[in-house]
Amino acid sequence: MKTTMKLMATTCLTLTATLAVAESHMADEMTIVSWGGAYSASQNNAYHMPYSEMTGVNIINDESSAEAVAKLRAMNEAGNVTWDVVDVVASDAIRLCDEGLALEIDFDEQLAPGDDGSTASDDFGDLLVSDCFIPQIVYSTTFGYRTDLVGDTAPTDICAVFDTETYPGMRSLEKRPINNMEWALLCDGVAKDDVYDVLETEEGQAQAFAKLDTIKDSVIWWSAGADTPQLLADGEVVMGSTYNGRLFALIEEQDQPVAMLWDAQVFDLGGWIIPTGLSPEREARALDYVRFATDTQRLADQAKYISYGPARASSAPLVGNHAELGIDMAPHMPTDPANAENTFLYNYEWWADYRDDLDAKFQVWLSQ
Amino acid sequence: MSDTTTGPVLAADGRPLKASLNRALRRQKLRAMMLIAPLLIFILVSFVMPIADMLFRSVENQIVSDTLPRTTALLPDWDGEGAPDDMIYEALARDLAVAVEAKAHTRLGSRLNYERTGISSLLRKTGRGVDEIGETPQDVLEGVNDIWKDRDAFGRLIGTSEWVDAINAWDGEDSSTRIAPEFNANSSFAEQFPGTTSLYASYVLQSVSEEDNPLGEKPWPILFHVLAQELPSATPPSDVPEELALALREAATALDGVVLDDPRAVFLDIDDDWGDQGVWTTIQTYGPAYTNGYFLNSIDMQKGLDGPEWRPENEQIYIVLFIRTMIMSLTIMGMCVLLGYPIAWLLANLPDRKANMLMILVLLPFWTSLLVRTSAWKVLLQQQGVINDVLVWIGIVADDGRLQLINNQTGTIIAMTHILLPFMILPLYSVMKTIPPSYLRAAKSLGATNWTAFWRVYFPQSVPGIGAGCILVFILSIGYYITPELVGGTKGVFISNRIAYHISSSLNWGLAAALGTILLAVVMLLYWMYDKIVGIDNVKLGG
């Protein structure tokens, strides 16, 4: 009997102690959600490690950004949000903000001012596309091509994608209407400024599909960002669209015979949101983290590890050399003036409206 | 003849034996129930309830009437011609003022955008402009009497004095014991000013949900707008605080001749689409709390003005996908039977050492990650891949005529057959293991040829294994989406890919739930047919 009592008492004590430890543990731990791979690694080097060192907060990496919107909604409905800071693309941030799942940010109050003295909202400028979204990087969706498979004249123009005579062979495009519809119209003679006006009409959509029809038989459709680099490396495709950071890794780190096509590339943004429904302490810590991680120096630091441009104007002059390869990163940035001669601005608001409708039509078109 | 048959049989304690037996059994049943209770509760909580909840979303549509209660109450009477009348714009102005404070208007926008493109940005835009309604009367009133600048003016005017005291006391309480007192309106005021009262009640709810004291917050401008509208036709009640009664009377004279904001003009000024009949039809059609819209959508139909109608041809996709999913799953199932049967036969009939070796080969891929196996197929099947390279090297196909084996239906069928093969082999093997080899020998000794012995004696006994394997493979393949997404290209994707898209990307969970419900119903129907034709007793998962 005595032994049993003792055993029970010990168990109780251990349990209480464990709970207490778990409780205090919770206080200096935060979960940050991102995309994984080289991108997460760059964040780890540039943001997480210095922040942990400075504050003692232990950062847990979760690689669920691809399903972030759905998971955040489910967590919110269940009333148990386990994520503190989430890395999403701008269009997802708008969706999350619309759904009331992301915290609205007062940029000038809650973010650090730029090193050059500008306020945060001036420093980020036009990149503040949603009230809930703190931009971090600028990336481009652009084309890479096999230098050994395109013949003597390397493509310099986006319309090479639609020119199967000069550049025979397969291409890879993303399996969704976004970007593809715009490129199709651009190459069908629509002026850059009119693209979304044209795409709003039934005729304009038909025109874009008709243009895509001309290459439909030579397209491999991708849904994961790693697909195009792999297809290019295997020589499965002559050219293909993907994110510029992936192409940088393929060209500079893996030394494949691939080159980048900087024309009509589509700018997009990656950045942070903070979920709603956090306890005040966790929310304060999350805000503290993003304030640190999006200051001028930290954003410039990330560019040492991956070729995505910092979202702050004040960070651009601080971009240095690649941490391992030692090459100058500035010419590889989508924001570099030489690369950004002819870019295409992606219209978030427009796609927020037309995405559901056009996606249905795109799927029908694909299956025909 | 004996007399023991008269009257019920009694137990030793004198009670009827039947009742006594029942009692004993009941206790036993209860004990059995308690033994399975943990599992039962676990299944209910973690399996049945979530599924039911998800399926329920396919008809649930309360978001529209919850966000726009006043508008949806009026809309059923709208004739659907042109733009609705001013009453409805007025109701919408009040609803949206509340919704914007609760940040619910953008959520409604994404819901309605599934039905009509453009509503998402329309509501987002309107949310930024709707709060100017009411600024005109607010300025007039605040100019006449400073009491309107007091943040608690509306509360003291509309609420009973008990409620005012209660809410102030609540505000001073500790946060752990805070349950806000229910709003109580002064009944004579409510009678004269129903619109103001109802809007103020919404205002109170919103403040309280943010844990703020409604008497300490700035009143919304729209409250002044509604008050000013109701003032001319109302007789100010006498039982409100004196200074407020005075202010009300002053207000009536001050507002005389002031032109109030016209909600219709404000809305049209924000966006012309508010004059568009289509936008209003959408809100009217999706006003009810439950809708069959998602189900119609998932069979390529939509709610039209005169009942369900087909969607435009360039938006019809789901029926095609359902049929394709069925056909391809059946094909994969057939391939699994063809390939799995001989392997299972070998497994069951080889000497143990060799059979074990073979078994490991069957199970090894089973233990490998699904993604790795799928990616391996990519390397093998692509045009510059191993298989094509070998075929070109042998000379069977020309270098410029390499076979297209992936990113189409062929790719999906090959990869999925490989992945699902163990689910066919294992039940087949366990059934074949129980068929005594002596039966075949007996058949042969009676003069049967090899084929006859197999077909007439062995095969019928292995049918339960085929049945079990087929059900497993078919049901698994119908719900697969990772493999088709990776190797299916455009023609090899399943309905589950669309369900996954609506769950994770478009957030249209209602449509995803409707598609899932239909898929579940189809599987149930097939299962029922299978039971009728083959009989479910003829299925064996093990010896």
Image (tube, rainbow, N blue to C red):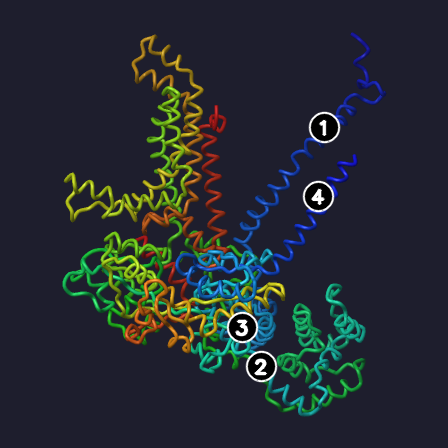
Which comes before the other along the chain, label 2 or label 1? 1
Q: Indicate the amino acid at tag 3.
A: Ile
Residue occupied by mark 1: B28
Vertical arrangement, residue B404 with respect to residue B231, above or below: above
Element class at badge 4: helix
Q: How many marks?
A: 4
The answer to which image quadrant residue B356 occupies is top left
Residue occupied by mark 3: A105
Element class at badge 1: helix
The answer to which image quadrant residue A239 occupies is bottom left
Q: CA distance from mark 3 to mark 4?
A: 46 Å
Horizontal and vertical percent for residue B389?
20, 43
Binning the other alpha carbons within 10 Å of mark 3 as few (below 14), some (14 to 19) or many (20 upward) gives some
Q: CA distance from mark 1 to mark 3?
A: 62 Å
Give the quarter of the figure containing the N terminus of chain B: top right
Given this view, does label 1 or label 3 mark the residue nearer the observer? Answer: 3
Vertical arrangement, residue B418 with respect to residue B49, above or below: above
**Which residue is pictured at 29% across the width and 70% down the height?**
A264
Q: Indicate the amino acid at tag 2.
A: Ile
Which comes before the other along the chain, label 3 or label 4? 4
